[in-house]
């Protein structure tokens, strides 16, 4: 049996004590949740961890804000719900994929790691109120599982200690309580205007997309982001060494075919065989001429020019310079700086009924004190996955006055129809109850 490495046990023990100390130092449940899904990576080497409380994901590794509708969050919540059906949430164990349904197994292969471990968090009565989903590429050893179970007791104790205490019972007279309840009921019936916040970006209106005209490697960008260009200005130059060589070879091949046709034409008066080959040679000349013209066209496409005046809208030239691109791949957009619209990504969970022409207010990140008015023009029927990994509807709005500069980002506030204050406050809880309970 191999002897343990010198100092390895001391290092593991020191890391374990450090995790317990971090849990006890947490000032609130947010800090504790962050520590639970991040600080243990150095000791246990998991790829990602998810903290679930009452079946809902509260924290994720390396994620500051949990998006409730993201695919990974939905997968973890569905996986733990499946484990609950097998009565395996009350004990720490390695997750057996055979206990999961087919869809959850497929999501685990795509979104998680090969080996997962469920670490329950229990209260003083021994009931499981939450747990940690830990996933990595290698199985958890028996020693690591023992440390995890010990660490779970510390985490559960710290979490319960940071929970807010139950409010004291108000010792008011019954009549006063009835009056307060009636006033609150009337207050909840007051109609208010529904509104929702969503990230937004100022994008070009009616811009001309500049796409790659051929398969090749971009040699250089001749313009910079947001630079003004005129019609016919050179924008992008492709690597043309091979294209020039092809055009030169095609030109020489055409010359050879024309020379052969001319020689046979001169011999046709005395040589019957040369006369018979004239049609074939003439067709070959036309073929070589077409190949020459095509090679010239490809060479001409190696320089992309602006088809209209405007500004060049793109992110970064260094990202594409020197890299191969395919025909039709988007390079930039030529837009009129005075023509812009507002593009909004409305998360599925925040969607409300919005009619064309609905009022929209934009607050830019660079200028949050000023309000830019806009009106809703279009809204997508289908939600799509955004760059942040969440499902959202795309909405387009036009500015009432002069639009801000293209490329600026901010937060859009969209206004819907009026509804009772009770509905405005309870819309999200009602939707969650409808989704989970089905009534």
Image: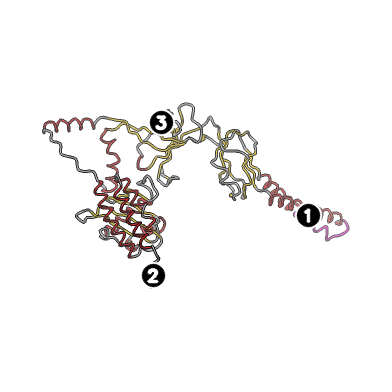
**Which residue is the site of mark 2?**
3
Q: Secondary structure at mark 3?
A: strand
**Image height check: is 250 above or below 392?**
below
Number of marks present in the image shown: 3
Q: For this view, does 412 lie left or right of residue 28?
A: right
Q: Are marks 2 and 1 in contact (CB under 8 Å)?
A: no
Q: Residues within 10 Å of mark 3 (few under 14, many from 20)?
A: some
Q: Residue at x 41, y 61 (%)?
A: 137
Q: Does the rendering let one see residue 106?
A: no
Q: CA distance from mark 1 to mark 3?
A: 69 Å
- Circle nearer the viewer, 2 or 1: 2
Q: Secondary structure at mark 1?
A: helix
Labels 3 and 2: the sequence-earlier one = 2
Q: Position of residue 328 (x, y in %)?
A: 57, 46
Q: For this view, does 305 lie left or right of residue 2?
A: right
Labels 2 and 1: the sequence-earlier one = 2
Can you tell which quarter of the image residue 278 is in?
bottom right
- Circle nearer the viewer, 3 or 2: 2
Q: CA distance from mark 3 to mark 2?
A: 68 Å
The span shown in magenta is 269-284
């Amino acid at each position: 049996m191999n002897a343990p490495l010198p100092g390895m046990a001391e290092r593991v023990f020191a890391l374990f004590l450090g995790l317990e100390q971090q849990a006890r130092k947490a000032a609130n449940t947010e800090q504790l949740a962050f520590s639970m899904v991040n600080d243990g990576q150095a000791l246990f080497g998991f790829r990602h961890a998810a903290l679930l409380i009452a079946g809902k994901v509260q924290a994720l590794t390396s994620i500051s804000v949990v998006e409730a509708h993201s695919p990974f969050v939905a997968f973890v919540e569905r996986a733990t719900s499946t484990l609950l059906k097998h009565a395996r949430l009350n004990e720490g164990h390695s997750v057996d994929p055979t206990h999961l349904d087919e869809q959850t197994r497929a999501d685990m292969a795509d979104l998680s790691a090969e080996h997962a471990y469920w670490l329950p968090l229990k209260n003083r009565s021994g009931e499981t109120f939450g747990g940690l989903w830990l996933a990595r590429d290698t199985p958890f050893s028996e020693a690591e599982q023992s440390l995890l179970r010990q660490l779970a007791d510390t985490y559960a104790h710290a979490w319960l200690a940071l929970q807010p205490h139950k409010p004291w019972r108000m010792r008011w007279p019954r009549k006063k309580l009835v009056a307060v309840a009636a006033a609150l009921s009337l207050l909840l019936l007051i109609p208010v205007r529904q509104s929702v916040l969503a990230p937004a970006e100022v994008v070009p209106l009616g811009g001309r997309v500049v796409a790659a005209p051929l398969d090749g490697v971009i040699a250089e960008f001749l313009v910079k982001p947001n630079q003004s260009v005129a019609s016919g200005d050179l924008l992008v130059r492709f690597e043309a060494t091979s294209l020039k060589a092809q055009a030169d070879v095609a030109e020489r091949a055409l010359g050879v075919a024309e020379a052969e046709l001319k020689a046979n034409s001169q011999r046709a008066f005395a040589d019957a065989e040369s006369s018979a080959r004239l049609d074939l040679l003439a067709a070959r000349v036309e073929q070589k001429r077409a190949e020459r013209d095509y090679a010239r066209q490809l060479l001409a496409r190696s320089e992309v020019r602006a088809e209209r005046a405007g500004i060049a809208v793109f992110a970064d030239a260094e990202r594409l310079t020197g890299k191969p691109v395919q025909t039709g791949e988007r390079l930039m957009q030529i837009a009129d700086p005075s023509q812009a619209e507002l593009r909004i990504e409305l998360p599925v969970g925040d969607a409300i009924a919005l009619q064309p022409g609905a009022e929209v207010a934009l607050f830019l990140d660079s200028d949050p004190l000023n309000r830019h008015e806009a009106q809703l023009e279009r809204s997508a029927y289908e939600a799509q996955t955004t760059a942040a990994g969440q499902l959202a509807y795309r909405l387009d709005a036009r500015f009432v006055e002069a639009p801000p500069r293209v490329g600026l980002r901010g937060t859009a506030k969209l206004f819907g129809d009026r509804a009772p204050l009770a509905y405005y406050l309870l819309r999200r809880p009602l939707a969650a109850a409808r989704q989970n309970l089905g009534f």
